[in-house]
Amino acid sequence: MTTILNCRRMLCPMPVIKVQNALKDLESGETLTVTCTDPGTLHDIPTWCRINGHSVIEQTENDGEYVFVIDKMTS
C-alpha cells in the first residue's frame, strides 16, 4: 500500500514532521510518497529517514517539486 502526502508550500521543519506522523500510521514494508517544494527537503528527508531506519527508495525533482518515495523499514 502506498500513502500520498502533500507537503507543497510547507517550510522546514513541517515536511519532516508530516513525514514522521504519516509513517507512524503505516506498517513495515508500506510506502509513503511525499511531494514537497522546499529545497531543504532534499537533505532533510533522506537524513531523517536514515537516522530513523527508513529508506528513500526513489527521489525525483521536476519544476521545483521534490518527490520522495519512502519505504517504512521499522515498526
Image: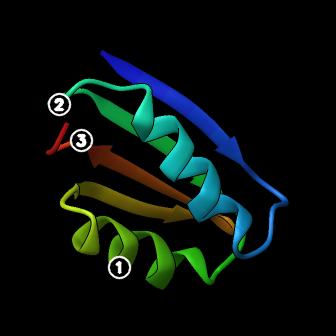
State left or right for residue 31 relative to residue 36: left
What type is the residue that disc 3 sits on?
Lys
- First along the sequence among labels 1 and 3: 1
Residue identified by numbered label 1: 47
Tell me which residue sits at (57%, 63%) in the image.
16
Tell me which residue sits at (35%, 26%) in the image.
26
State left or right for residue 27 relative to residue 36: left
The answer to which image quadrant residue 60 occupies is bottom left
Q: Nearer the viewer, residue 62 or 67?
A: 67
Q: Give the structural element (helix, strand or loop) at label 3.
A: loop
What type is the residue that disc 1 sits on?
Thr
Tell me which residue sits at (42%, 36%) in the image.
24
Residue identified by numbered label 3: 72
The answer to which image quadrant residue 13 occupies is bottom right
- First along the sequence among labels 1 and 2: 2
State left or right for residue 68 relative to residue 5: left
How crowded pointer 2 is (Cα within 10 Å; few <14, some 14-19, many 20+) is rated as some
Q: Nearer the viewer, residue 65 or 72?
A: 72
- On the image, the x and y values in percent for residue 3 come to 46, 24
Question: Does 23 sit above or below residue 30?
Answer: below
Label drawn at residue 8? none
Residue identified by numbered label 2: 28
- First along the sequence among labels 2 and 3: 2
- Measure the alpha-carbon separation of dots 2 and 3: 5 Å
Are the residues tagged 2 and 3 within 8 Å (C-beta)? yes
Question: Does 2 sit above or below residue 60?
Answer: above
